[in-house]
Amino acid sequence: MRIAFATVGCRLNQFETDALRGKAQAADHQVVSFEADADAYVINTCTITAEADADSRQLARRAVRRNPSALVVVTGCYAQAAPEAVAAIPGVDLVIGNREKAGLLAEIEEAQKDGAPHVRVGEIGTAFRMDGDEYGPGIDPDRTRAFLKVQDGCNYACSFCIVPAVRGTNRSQPPARVLDAIRRLHAAGFPEVVLTGIHLGTYGRDLDPRTTLVALCEQIVALPEAPRVRLSSLDPHEVTPDLIRLLADSSRFCRHLHLPLQSGDEDVLRRMRRGHTAAEFQSLVERLVAAVPGIAVTGDVIVGFPGEDEDAFRKTYELLEGLPLAGLHVFSYSRRPGTDAAEYPDQISRATRAARSRALRGLAGRKAHAFRERAVGAVLEVVTLRRDRAPGLLEGLSDNYLRVWFPGEAALQGSAVRVRVEHATGRGVSGSLL
């Protein structure tokens, strides 16, 4: 069977798609581009914003147009949140919830295109444990980085966020299973593993015996041999002094942390129920930069949250302007049905949200370029991702999350190299192999 995959949303969604793609290949199915003719199209969706919902619907319709006789399968968070709406899209055959996603391949193999959508969406709140190796590691298309899901779900209740309703409660992979997966990935030749989760900082709180992300990281450091390890997004209040020390002392962990700020105004943060203050975020970034030279600290911010007046936005802008961030993801607030913030008064107009997004995206671009310029002269540890279109040029990713271009042989793809940075460019940095 020819199967095509498409993903909307976060790194965890990308991991799950990559893992499902790997399962399909292991079962002797042919994985093809989403733009190719396929027997089945799988769309792994997101529902974090209304735009993500729309992108998910658009992909389903595109698959139907591409091959009306193919199975069209919609899974992920939008399918979990609104299965009836997804099933109503003409041409959709299967709607698969997040709890059922790991068994999606079997559903495809047994499915019949009979003109009636079949919905397999269970109650996500009943998925209290991560039983067994749900997916296996997710492999990126270039087979140079592996994504390892170690946690799922969220027990928090941010007022704007629909994620707990579609991902369920906090669930963690036992440390022994994580360590075994890392050993296997190292033996297979992968130079980098990314630990992923919906709320990675709560790793281990559900396990018996209870453990922590730092304890897991210390066990990874103790492995005799392992690839380098990158952590995905962490809430600011979950970055402990012990974790900062580990990042400073161990070359095994990448010098990169992504920290969702969401707002620089204390009142907005309180109404978001974020669990940290703007002052705490500022202090954390400053401590990280002082303790870990060259670290890339990136962040998330939401503009146009209900009640965010001009003064609140100014405080957010000024806080971010003064911080040594390497990058920033800017999101316009999206009203999500079922969340508390959807019912808040003082909703902000689309035009105002768009203007504030433009302002912060401009700032984000300047911050990213300044970080690239600060890297000139540094020697970076780089994983070679792929050959560039330009002859003789390779593209890689540094431990501190810079795209790096350098001359080299194609045989270096998938290997770890050292590169001296000579120039900052519009997309990353360039340099020479050492």
Image (cartoon, helix red, strand yellow):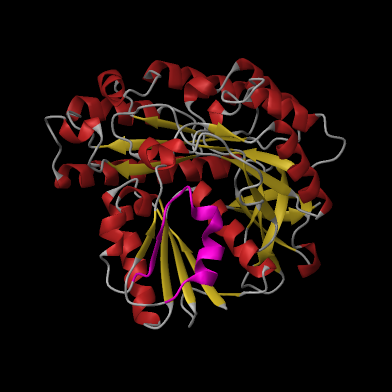
Give the quarter of the figure containing the N terminus: bottom right
Residue 179 found in image quarter: top right
Tell me where residue 138 appears, x and y as whole percent: 63, 54
Tell me where residue 17 appears, x and y as whole percent: 54, 58
Instruction: Using the image as rendered, state which of residue 147 and residue 372 is in the foreground.
Output: 147
Q: Is residue 239 above or below residue 144?
A: above
Q: Is residue 301 left or right of residue 288?
A: left
Instruction: Using the image as rendered, state which of residue 248 and residue 83 is in the foreground.
Output: 83
Residue 182 found in image quarter: top right
Q: Residue furthest right?
A: 224
Instruction: Using the image as rendered, state which of residue 8 and residue 313 is in the foreground.
Output: 8
- Whether the magenta-drawn stretch holds residue 283 is answered as no
Residue at point 68%, 48% (across, down)? 421
Let me know if residue 98 appears in the view.
yes
Q: Which residues are magenta?
A: 92-112
Tell me where residue 355 appears, x and y as whole percent: 21, 45
Q: Is residue 348 left or right of residue 45?
A: left
